Image (spheres, rainbow, N blue to C red):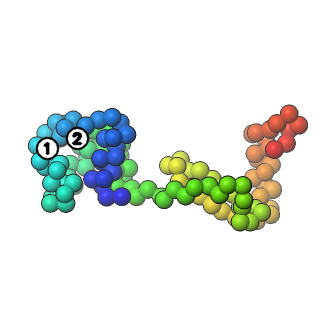
Amino acid sequence: MEIITKISSLLAERNQEQKELCAFLQIKPQVFSDWKAGRSQSYQKYLPKIAAFFHCSIDTLLETPIKKEPLAQGKALHQNEVHILGRNGAQIKRVLSDEEYEKVKKMLELVVSDEDGKL
């Protein structure tokens, strides 16, 4: 995701307006419009201030999100295939060995159990 698109998304997610960011950065709205249109990349020198505005790190602004895939409904490609939802919402798919699968199953049984103490 291009950084300007990410900034626009963050503004929308947080119900903030472009003019609020411009005021915080002490830039004219036209400057932000130039960034969006690709006419200027001067936003690079504002990255620390932009990160401060969003209360995040510069790395968070620059990171490329992992494509989220919908979970397969009710069918795994392999018996030991697991789908894990990461902190950033990205889905990780992995086929575990039988030994790994049993270890994970035992760990989950300790954490989550029904009335019989089994998953």
Amino acid under label 1? Pro
Q: Where is residue 97 in the image (x, y as percent from the top left)?
A: 76, 65
Amino acid under label 2? Gln
Q: Residue furthest right?
A: 116
| 85 horizontally vs 106: left or right | left
Q: Quadrant of residue 56?
A: top left
Element type where label 2 sits in the image: helix
Crowding around mark 1 (Cα neighbors within 10 Å: few <14, some 14 to 19, many 20+) is some
* Above or below for 16 versus 105: above
Query: Which disc, if any, is residue 18?
Result: 2
Q: Position of residue 51 (x, y in %)?
A: 30, 44
Kindly check if marks 1 and 2 are in contact, taking CB atoms under 8 A apart as contact: yes
Relative depth, front residue between 70 and 103: 70
Q: Where is residue 107 in the image (x, y as percent from the top left)?
A: 76, 47
Question: Residue at image x 81%, y 44%?
Answer: 119
Query: Which disc, if any, is residue 29?
Result: 1
* Above or below for 87 versus 101: above
